[in-house]
Image (spheres, grey):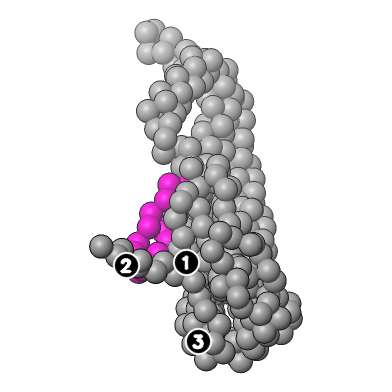
């Protein structure tokens, strides 16, 4: 008799829960299929948008886990399990982890923004956070630069994405800003001609935009000229140093004095 009761109870449980179980299995199968299709579509979209590979993997894994957690909660709810407390535990755990990793999450968010909006790419020469260098690697949390003296510079993406970024490579050309001073006895037209000839003789100086030489300032002991040649971004320092050297040689050859402090002998 007792055995029959257990059989009857078991049969009743199966009858009561079979629809829920079948519904939960169906939801899991359909949900897993939908998640797979969503991740595939997102991956194709990222490939079309040329997103960074590391960002693609991270976002796809993150989305996959989030959707699976949602699916598990839905399946448990279908089976009649109370999911309110379960969701509260997940929310509390997420908040605790977020507070503990606040700085890292900020850097992660900054890395995502950099990879999405691409203010610079690998190989670009940029200035950011008081540092100048060529972008070597863009990671999820940090960006690595190679400094002008071959130093490795690591900048957190949080501060990088929230600060000013100067990208010298975007336009492909740069203007070199130089100032040279000559004595007040020097002829302005002759000086401008000499300075302009130095620029024209340099093959790295571009004809378009046209280089300029103008009187910039009447200083205390010199007439200062603003010399502004344009060049390719990669030729910036070559043009800077070559123009400085050739200008000194050209001014000396033309007999144009570059003022400098003279020692005064005091008669006793």
Q: Secondary structure at mark 1?
A: strand
Query: Which residue: 55% across, 82% down?
Result: 256
Q: Is residue 188 visible?
A: yes
Magenta region:
139-157
Q: Quadrant of the C terminus?
A: bottom left
Q: Residues within 10 Å of mark 3 (few under 14, many from 20)?
A: few
Q: Crowdedness of circle 2 by 10 Å Cα count: few (<14), some, many (20+)?
A: few
Q: Nearer the viewer, mark 1 or mark 2?
A: 2
Q: Are marks 1 and 2 in contact (CB under 8 Å)?
A: no
Q: Which residue is mark 1?
A: 134
Q: Which label was assigned to residue 69?
A: none
Q: Position of residue 156 (x, y in %)?
A: 43, 47
Residue 145 covered by magenta stretch: yes
Q: CA distance from mark 1 to mark 2?
A: 50 Å
The number of callouts visible is 3
Query: Viewer-proximal residue, 181 or 89?
Result: 181
Q: Secondary structure at mark 2?
A: loop
Which of pointers 1 and 3 lies earlier in the amino acid sequence?
1
Query: As rendered, which of 99 and 257 lies closer to the eye?
Result: 257
Q: Extreme left residue here?
A: 268
**Rendered image: mark on residue 252:** 3
Question: Residue 182 occupies which quadrant of the picture?
Answer: bottom right
- Residue 239 rendering spot, x and y as whole percentages: 54, 80
- Left or right, 144 with respect to 35, comes to left
Q: Position of residue 183 (x, y in %)?
A: 56, 73
Q: Earlier in the sequence, mark 3 or mark 2?
A: 3
Q: Which residue is mark 2?
A: 265
């Amino acid at each position: 008799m007792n055995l029959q009761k257990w059989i009857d109870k078991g049969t009743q449980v199966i009858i009561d829960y079979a629809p829920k179980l079948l519904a939960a299995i169906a939801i899991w199968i359909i949900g897993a299929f939908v998640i797979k299709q969503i991740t595939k579509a997102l991956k194709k979209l990222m490939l079309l948008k040329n997103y960074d590979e590391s960002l693609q993997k991270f976002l796809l894994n993150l989305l996959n886990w989030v959707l699976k957690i949602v699916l598990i909660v839905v399946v448990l709810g279908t089976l009649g399990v109370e999911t309110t407390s379960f969701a509260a535990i997940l929310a509390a755990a997420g908040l605790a982890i977020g507070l503990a990793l606040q700085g890292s999450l900020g850097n992660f968010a900054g890395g995502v923004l950099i990879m999405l909006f691409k203010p610079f790419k690998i190989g670009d020469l940029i200035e950011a956070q008081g540092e100048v260098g060529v972008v070597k690697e863009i990671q999820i949390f940090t960006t690595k630069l190679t400094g002008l003296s071959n130093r490795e510079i690591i900048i957190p993406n949080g501060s990088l994405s929230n600060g000013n970024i100067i990208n010298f490579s975007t336009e492909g050309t740069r203007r070199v800003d130089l100032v040279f001073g000559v004595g007040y006895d020097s002829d302005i037209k002759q000086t401008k001609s000499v300075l302009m000839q130095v620029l024209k003789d340099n093959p790295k100086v571009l004809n378009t935009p046209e280089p300029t030489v103008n009187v910039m300032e009447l200083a205390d002991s010199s007439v200062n000229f603003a010399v502004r040649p344009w060049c390719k971004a990669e030729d910036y320092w070559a043009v800077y140093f070559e123009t400085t050297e050739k200008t000194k040689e050209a001014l000396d050859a033309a007999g144009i004095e570059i003022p400098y402090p003279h020692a005064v002998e005091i008669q006793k």
